[in-house]
Image (cartoon, helix red, strand yellow):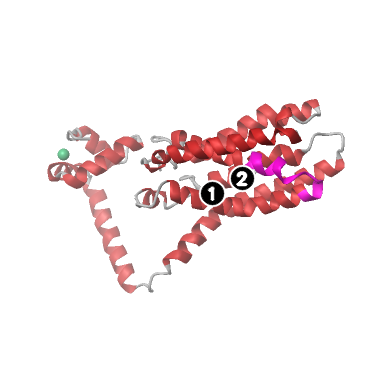
Amino acid sequence: MNTHPTPVLISRYAAGDAIDDATVWAIEAHLESCAACRTVLTTAVDPAARQLLDRVADGIAAGIAAGPAPARRRRLRRAGVTARILPWLATAVALMLVAVLFESTFHSMPSLVLLIAPVAPLLPVAAAWSRRTDPAWELIASMPRTGLSLLLRRTFAVLMAVVPVLAAAGGVTGHSPVRWLLPCLAFTAGALALGGLVGVDRAALGLSVVWSVGVIAPSLAGQRLPVILEAGSWPGWAAATAGLVAVLLIRAGDHSRPGIGYGQPGIGRN
Ligand SMILES: [Zn+2]
């Protein structure tokens, strides 16, 4: 934003009105460099709120002065991410367990393990990258390391947890690894590539829903595995994975834009 935001917009910002994220980022960037607008902002904040802010600032300063030494950064960050992903990892593991039981009970049905494998990592990936589950998303969104490298590290952590579960499920049900691993990798890469446009959590959830409605449900209803999951279709999945990874790397900049990776601007701000 090169021009000054209107006083009305600044007072809406001060009042905490629902303003879309892109505008909020622009206002905040502008305020950093414009003393005139900071003055407008000071008068726009209502006096009671200003007193509250002063009290909070004093309280925080006193707490920091009196509190224990800060925990080690690395351990804290890992614990936070792990705690958020764990319930979704547990869900993915439970789903695979159900799939294995289903498959070994109903022999006439198509393989549920193969049907679920492509979307198994998507829920934990969405959880690892959703600002709705991340209390520190604003902090992370402002870090210089935000973007593709952080996204890839979190996704890799999810895959390191999900792939062994898939391997166990595939081993028990006797499916070749290429039949579950390649679709799983292709969908993960797809969620990340699409995530550059709409946010990773939305992309992952969207792909899960599309696959469930478009492939899993009809396959179970028709009692046959779709052609794309037959043993001979692995070159297609390999090509899709390679193509999507290439798109992801070429469009790496998408993941550095404010708001992206944490959902579209304007949605779910709180
Ligand atoms: Zn200004």
Q: How many marks?
A: 2
Q: What amino acid is labelled 2 in the image?
A: Pro
The correct choice, above or below, for 199 with respect to 101 in the image is above
Q: Is residue 192 left or right of residue 136?
A: right
Q: Which residue is mark 2?
A: 121
Q: Does the residue at mark 1 contact the one at mark 2 (Cβ under 8 Å)?
A: yes
Q: Which residues are magenta?
A: 171-184
Q: Which mark is residue 155?
A: 1
Q: Residue furthest left?
A: 36
Q: What amino acid is labelled 1 in the image?
A: Thr
Residue 75 placed where, x, y %?
48, 66
Name the quarter where the C terminus is drawn. Answer: top left
Q: Is residue 243 left or right of residue 144?
A: right
Q: Residue at x 28, y 66 (%)?
A: 61
Whether residue 42 appears in magenta in the rendering, the answer is no
Whether residue 175 appears in magenta in the rendering, the answer is yes
Graded by Cα atoms within 10 Å as few (under 14), some (14 to 19) or many (20 or more), the crowding at tag 1 reads: many
